[in-house]
Amino acid sequence: LHTTTAAERRTIVFDATHGRGADVGIEAAGSPRAFEEGLTLTRDGGRYVIAGHYTNAGSSSINAHEHINRKHLEIRGCWGSEAGHFLRALTVLEQQAGKVPFRDIGARVYALTELNDALADAESMRVPKALVDPSRH
Protein backbone atom coordinates (compact mmCIF):
# COMPACT_ATOMS: atom_id res chain seq x y z
CA LEU A 1 0.00 0.00 0.00
CA HIS A 2 1.40 3.38 -1.00
CA THR A 3 0.96 6.12 1.58
CA THR A 4 1.56 9.86 1.46
CA THR A 5 1.36 12.69 3.93
CA ALA A 6 -1.19 15.49 3.71
CA ALA A 7 1.61 17.85 2.64
CA GLU A 8 2.70 15.46 -0.13
CA ARG A 9 -0.88 15.11 -1.39
CA ARG A 10 -1.28 18.89 -1.42
CA THR A 11 1.93 19.26 -3.44
CA ILE A 12 0.83 16.56 -5.90
CA VAL A 13 -2.61 18.13 -6.46
CA PHE A 14 -1.41 21.73 -6.74
CA ASP A 15 1.53 20.82 -8.99
CA ALA A 16 -0.78 18.87 -11.31
CA THR A 17 -3.28 21.76 -11.48
CA HIS A 18 -0.79 24.63 -11.84
CA GLY A 19 -1.56 25.84 -8.34
CA ARG A 20 -5.36 25.95 -8.72
CA GLY A 21 -6.54 22.80 -6.95
CA ALA A 22 -8.84 20.06 -8.22
CA ASP A 23 -11.90 21.00 -10.30
CA VAL A 24 -13.82 18.21 -8.58
CA GLY A 25 -12.92 16.66 -5.25
CA ILE A 26 -14.47 13.34 -4.22
CA GLU A 27 -14.24 12.21 -0.62
CA ALA A 28 -14.66 8.44 -0.68
CA ALA A 29 -12.75 7.35 2.43
CA GLY A 30 -15.41 7.97 5.06
CA SER A 31 -12.92 9.77 7.29
CA PRO A 32 -13.60 13.19 8.82
CA ARG A 33 -9.95 14.12 8.23
CA ALA A 34 -10.20 13.12 4.56
CA PHE A 35 -13.35 15.26 4.28
CA GLU A 36 -11.52 18.28 5.70
CA GLU A 37 -8.42 17.72 3.57
CA GLY A 38 -10.44 17.36 0.39
CA LEU A 39 -12.00 20.77 0.92
CA THR A 40 -8.53 22.33 0.96
CA LEU A 41 -7.50 20.51 -2.24
CA THR A 42 -10.53 21.61 -4.29
CA ARG A 43 -10.10 24.80 -6.35
CA ASP A 44 -12.02 28.03 -5.87
CA GLY A 45 -15.37 27.59 -7.61
CA GLY A 46 -14.92 23.82 -7.66
CA ARG A 47 -17.29 21.01 -6.76
CA TYR A 48 -16.82 18.68 -3.81
CA VAL A 49 -18.71 15.38 -3.54
CA ILE A 50 -18.99 13.62 -0.20
CA ALA A 51 -19.52 9.95 -1.05
CA GLY A 52 -17.69 8.08 1.69
CA HIS A 53 -19.79 8.98 4.72
CA TYR A 54 -22.54 6.36 4.59
CA THR A 55 -22.18 5.81 8.35
CA ASN A 56 -21.52 8.27 11.15
CA ALA A 57 -17.72 8.51 11.25
CA GLY A 58 -17.74 11.42 13.67
CA SER A 59 -17.56 15.18 13.50
CA SER A 60 -15.13 17.29 11.53
CA SER A 61 -13.75 20.70 12.28
CA ILE A 62 -14.22 22.98 9.29
CA ASN A 63 -14.52 26.72 8.99
CA ALA A 64 -17.53 27.38 6.74
CA HIS A 65 -16.12 30.75 5.62
CA GLU A 66 -12.58 29.58 4.94
CA HIS A 67 -13.28 26.15 3.47
CA ILE A 68 -16.59 26.71 1.65
CA ASN A 69 -17.93 30.25 1.21
CA ARG A 70 -14.66 32.05 0.43
CA LYS A 71 -13.90 29.39 -2.17
CA HIS A 72 -17.43 29.41 -3.65
CA LEU A 73 -17.49 25.63 -3.40
CA GLU A 74 -20.46 23.61 -4.57
CA ILE A 75 -20.85 20.68 -2.18
CA ARG A 76 -22.88 17.58 -2.99
CA GLY A 77 -23.69 14.72 -0.70
CA CYS A 78 -24.19 11.19 -1.95
CA TRP A 79 -25.79 8.46 0.11
CA GLY A 80 -26.78 5.26 -1.61
CA SER A 81 -26.58 4.41 -5.27
CA GLU A 82 -28.56 3.24 -8.26
CA ALA A 83 -27.83 0.45 -10.73
CA GLY A 84 -26.59 2.98 -13.30
CA HIS A 85 -23.87 4.10 -10.92
CA PHE A 86 -22.42 0.59 -10.85
CA LEU A 87 -22.49 0.34 -14.65
CA ARG A 88 -20.55 3.60 -14.94
CA ALA A 89 -18.11 2.46 -12.25
CA LEU A 90 -17.48 -0.82 -14.06
CA THR A 91 -16.86 1.10 -17.28
CA VAL A 92 -14.24 3.25 -15.53
CA LEU A 93 -12.60 0.16 -14.02
CA GLU A 94 -12.45 -1.46 -17.45
CA GLN A 95 -11.00 1.68 -19.08
CA GLN A 96 -8.39 2.15 -16.36
CA ALA A 97 -7.39 -1.51 -15.95
CA GLY A 98 -3.61 -1.72 -15.87
CA LYS A 99 -3.22 2.04 -15.30
CA VAL A 100 -4.50 2.30 -11.72
CA PRO A 101 -3.56 -0.24 -9.01
CA PHE A 102 -7.15 -0.90 -7.87
CA ARG A 103 -6.10 -4.01 -5.93
CA ASP A 104 -3.94 -1.86 -3.65
CA ILE A 105 -6.75 0.25 -2.14
CA GLY A 106 -6.71 -1.82 1.02
CA ALA A 107 -10.16 -3.35 0.71
CA ARG A 108 -10.79 -6.63 2.49
CA VAL A 109 -13.06 -9.31 1.07
CA TYR A 110 -15.30 -11.21 3.50
CA ALA A 111 -17.38 -14.35 3.04
CA LEU A 112 -21.12 -13.96 3.57
CA THR A 113 -20.72 -15.87 6.84
CA GLU A 114 -18.36 -13.07 7.97
CA LEU A 115 -20.91 -10.31 7.37
CA ASN A 116 -20.97 -9.22 11.02
CA ASP A 117 -17.16 -8.96 11.02
CA ALA A 118 -17.25 -6.93 7.79
CA LEU A 119 -19.76 -4.48 9.24
CA ALA A 120 -17.84 -4.17 12.52
CA ASP A 121 -14.51 -3.65 10.73
CA ALA A 122 -16.01 -0.98 8.44
CA GLU A 123 -17.72 0.81 11.31
CA SER A 124 -14.56 0.87 13.43
CA MET A 125 -12.49 1.82 10.34
CA ARG A 126 -10.16 -1.16 10.69
CA VAL A 127 -10.51 -1.51 6.91
CA PRO A 128 -10.98 1.26 4.32
CA LYS A 129 -13.59 -0.79 2.42
CA ALA A 130 -15.28 -4.03 3.41
CA LEU A 131 -16.45 -6.15 0.47
CA VAL A 132 -18.76 -9.13 0.94
CA ASP A 133 -18.50 -11.93 -1.61
CA PRO A 134 -21.52 -14.26 -1.25
CA SER A 135 -19.76 -16.98 -3.27
CA ARG A 136 -16.83 -17.10 -0.86
CA HIS A 137 -16.86 -19.75 1.87
Image: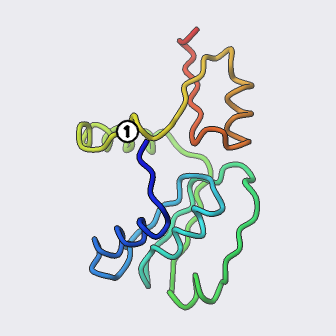
The answer to whether 55 appears left or right of 105 in the picture is right
Query: Which quadrant is home to the C terminus?
Result: top right
SS at badge 1: helix
State the count of labels.
1
Question: Is 64 located above or below residue 96 in the figure?
Answer: below
x and y, in percent, of residue 19 in the image? 32, 82
x and y, in percent, of residue 15 in the image? 29, 74
Question: Is 68 located above or below residue 49 in the figure?
Answer: below
x and y, in percent, of residue 52 in the image? 59, 52
Q: Which residue is mark 1?
A: 102
Residue at 43 percent across and 83 percent down: it is 45
Query: Which quadrant is home to the N terminus?
Result: top left
Residue at 23 percent across and 37 percent down: it is 98
Front in this rendered view, residue 1 or 137: 1
Residue at 63 percent across and 56 percent down: it is 31
The part of the image, by quadrant, that contains residue 41 is bottom left
The answer to whether 17 appears left or right of 55 in the picture is left
Front in this rendered view, residue 117 or 15: 15
